[in-house]
Image: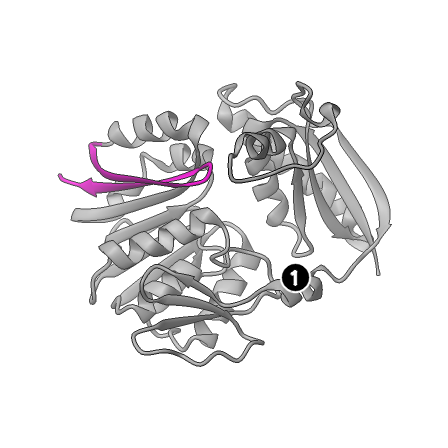
Amino acid sequence: MKYIELTVHTTTEASELVADVMWQFTPHGVAVSDAADIIALQKDSTVFWDYMDESVTAPQTDVLVKCFLEVATADEQTTLIMREIKSREALAGGAIPFGTLEETKREIEGDDWIDIWKKHFRPIHVGGKVVIVPEWIKYEKQAGEVIVTLDSNMAFGTGEHETTAMCLELLQEYGKAGDTVIDVGCGSGILGIAAAKLGAQKCYLTDIDPVAVESANHNAEKNGVSKSVVVAHSNLLDNADIKGELVLANITAEVLVMLAPSIPKNLKENGTLILSGIIKDRLSLVRSAFEAQGLEEVEMRNKGEWYALVYRWHK
């Protein structure tokens, strides 16, 4: 099958935001090519290189973010994608450099990315209890384990990425049976579904991407928690009366900063907020934004280049 590969030239700082926009318009894949990632790996003492071309690590600001669109709708989707990216740029008000935002398109022969990915995906043990299991793999549950079954037909959080793994670990440590849990930017629904299976009484999940909402609802049904999981197509909970003992937000740092003023309204007194998706360079920015809302930082955790923060809300 043929696809249109759309490439947008941007910066390291804006690459995750651009990728996030692209994911709203395609289930076929998004890729980020950033020399900064190679440089970070080069500095990692646990990674060994036989050879690296010096040109790969030469100073550069151009980051390529690519997505794959169906041929019939590619022109229309490209227009919508670029419009949304430029809207995010305007919203940032110059605080985040977006680069040239030059766009290029080419037709390619498509591989079956989903089936290729399936061959390499295995059950993932996270924290003391949770095991993420793809629905096409038979897994024998062990005593004390909580199984979250995921369908990968739509590409969102699976537990493999450090940011999702930290959220799952912290969820198990801070969550309590009977809690009301809110997951902002739910993606596949993995965090809210895990919370429900760990004993949360009610889980409210939100996402701005309709494909994510569909995916989360599908996975909630697969896991038998549809009655306790509510998924909304929303930037955040529109209903301020819905409050949780625990709020999770695994999104990019820039989006977390934009959401900071609105999140506390959905936290109960002495409630816990878990944030993830933060790179080291943006850590101070996120901290400042949430401390300004009167939240108390109680823990910071990191895996590789990614950080997670835990806050407590005292009115």
Residue 211, located in which quarter of the rendered image? bottom right
**Residue range of the region highlighted in magenta in the rendering:** 294-315
**Percent coordinates x, y for residue 208 in the rendering:** 50, 49
Question: At label 1, which amino acid type do we have?
Answer: Trp
Residue at x 29% of width, y 68% of height: 198
Rendering coords of residue 115 (x, y %): 70, 66
User: In front here: 111 or 227?
Assistant: 111
Total tally of numbered discs in the picture: 1
Quadrant placement of the N terminus: bottom right
Look at the image and tell me whether residue 120 can be seen.
yes
Q: Nearer the viewer, residue 297 or 72?
A: 297
SS assignment for the magenta stretch, majority: strand
Q: Position of residue 259 (x, y in %)?
A: 38, 37
Residue pointed to by mark 1? 117
Q: Counting other residues with Cα less than 10 Å from the Cα at mark 1, is it few (<14), some (14-19), or many (20 or more)?
A: few
> Which x, y percent locates residue 315?
13, 39
